[in-house]
Structure formats: structure tokens, C-alpha cells
Image (tube, grey):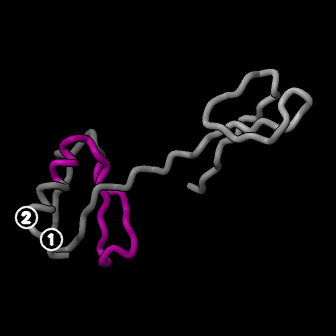
Amino acid sequence: MNRDLKYRVYVMQAALDGKAIQFSCNNGAEWDDAIDPKNTSAFAWNWDSFDYRIAPEPHKPREWWLTPATATCSTLFASEFMPHASCNPIHVREVLPE
């Protein structure tokens, strides 16, 4: 729980910049949300008892298009971009746990 000054400033500046901050009281085993990014003045830092970090960005689900093999399109094809509508593309979006 003893972080150097440079790291503390880094995390506190991120809070001022509106980033979500998390804290841990058990050496990083579990992290909880600490700061409402819109109200940083209501928060008191306690570096002696807690670790703080910038909350990780949520994972963005991947998306792609599948084009099935048809008379018009000869093979199964995956692409980041929507293929021609005549190929009857299927839009696929990854589902992530919360």
C-alpha cells in the first residue's frame, strides 16, 4: 500500500481529468469504485490504508460480418466491413460478461 509520489500524482491527476478511480484495502485482491469523476472534491485520499488505481477501461465487444456461401458468393467470408447486401451478410457482435 506504500506507493511512490509519482504514482500517487498520476492517479490523482487522472481523477481530476475525470477518469474513474478504484481502491483496494486488501493488496489488490478486490477493487471497488472510489470516485465519482464529476465530484472529486468530496473524496479524501488515504494512501496509508488503501491502494488506488485508474479503473480499467471496459472491453469493447468485437463486431464483424459473416457472408455465407451462396450462389452469388462462393465461400464463407468474415470481414470488419459490411459486404455487399446481395451476399446476405450476417452481423455478429461479441457478448461480454459484465
Percent across and percent down for residue 58 are: 45, 50
At label 2, the amino acid type is Leu
What residue is shown at x 33% (from left), y 73% (from top)? Answer: 28
Percent across and percent down for residue 45 are: 16, 60
What residue is shown at x 37% (from left), y 62% (from top)? Answer: 32
Q: Is residue 24 magenta?
A: yes
Between 86 and 14, the residue placed more toward the observer is: 86
Q: Which numbered dot is residue 95?
A: none
Q: Is residue 93 magenta?
A: no
What residue is shown at x 37% (from left), y 66% (from top)? Answer: 31
Residue with the mark numbered 1 = 3
CA–CA distance between discs 2 and 1? 7 Å
Name the quadrant of the C terminus.
bottom right
Q: Quadrant of residue 71?
A: top right
At label 1, the amino acid type is Arg
| In the rendered image, the vertical position of residue 79 relative to residue 58, given as above or below | above
Name the quadrant of the N terminus.
bottom left
Between 59 and 28, the residue placed more toward the observer is: 59
Q: Which numbered dot is residue 5?
A: 2
| In the rendered image, the vertical position of residue 60 relative to residue 65, given as above or below | below
| In the rendered image, the vertical position of residue 64 relative to residue 2, given as above or below | above
What residue is shown at x 77% (from left), y 22% (from top)? Answer: 85
- Farthest residue to the left: give it: 5
| In the rendered image, the vertical position of residue 50 relative to residue 7, given as above or below | below
Element type at marker 1? loop
Element type at marker 2? helix
2 and 1 marks in contact (CB < 8 Å): no
What range of the chain is rendered magenta? 12-35
| Total numbered labels | 2
